Image (cartoon, grey):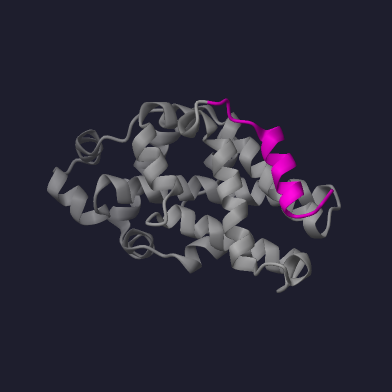
Amino acid sequence: MSTAAAARADHPAGDQPIAAVGLDAAPSWLSERLRTHPDADRAFRLARETFIAGRRIDMGALATSLGVDRTSLFRWVGNRDALLSEVLWSLAVPTLVQAEHAADDGGLEGAERVAAVLTHFVDDLIQADYFRQFLRREPARALRLLTTKESEIQRRYVATAAWLVRRDLGDEPLGGAIDPDALAYLLVRVSESFTYADLIAGDPPSTERARVAFRLLLRAD
């Protein structure tokens, strides 16, 4: 989730297949609204800029910057969690695209390719200062929005991982020992465990440990 990658994306969409999978699988009221409501999109873009700058998204301050009251802002975008979720996913999208490009540049296939995409994604999340600032500033909210089954973000990430599995390993991965959706969920939980290790277990986040776990789970070694 580099700043450069973040700056290139507008909101959850893209011209790469991997960019659309998650949103198609788990749309939200706000994600649909952003397609057709200019004021909602304007508020979203300002919130996104605020987040990338490493600042807390405050609904009162955001409303003031937009020249409206809080009631209007909530009518446009819903509550703060809904807005944060769409901002976070909008930043995940270019990061996933960038991770896939990095894996493609290596000429990888099959399990090697899936492991590489997910490893690059984890590394970018760990290295993004503004994202780590959010995790440190609001750890409980971050884990709730990013890692629970009620979260659109986790559902979108699992759907994206399942798409990668089906594309690169087929409908019966690992010799049919597990179905693609179940394997995708395990991969996402591995990703979360090492990306948010400091919040979950007090351990430092680790790209290398995630890489090893992905490869073992995918039988890439």
Whole-percent x, y for residue 58 in the image: 26, 35
Q: Residue at x 38, y 60 (%)?
A: 31
In-image side of 130 versus 208 (left or right): left
In-image side of 93 versus 116 (left or right): left
**Residue 217 among those drawn in magenta:** yes
Whole-percent x, y for residue 23 in the image: 48, 62
Q: Residue furthest bottom?
A: 171
Whole-percent x, y for residue 26 in the image: 44, 65
Q: Residue at x 58, y 51 (%)?
A: 188
Q: Residue furthest front?
A: 177
Nearest the camera: 122 or 197?
197
**Residue 173 among those drawn in magenta:** no
The segment highlighted magenta reads: 203-221
Q: Quarter holding the N terminus?
A: top right
Nearest the camera: 60 or 204?
204
Asked whether residue 99 is in view, the answer is yes
Q: Residue at x 39, y 46 (%)?
A: 145
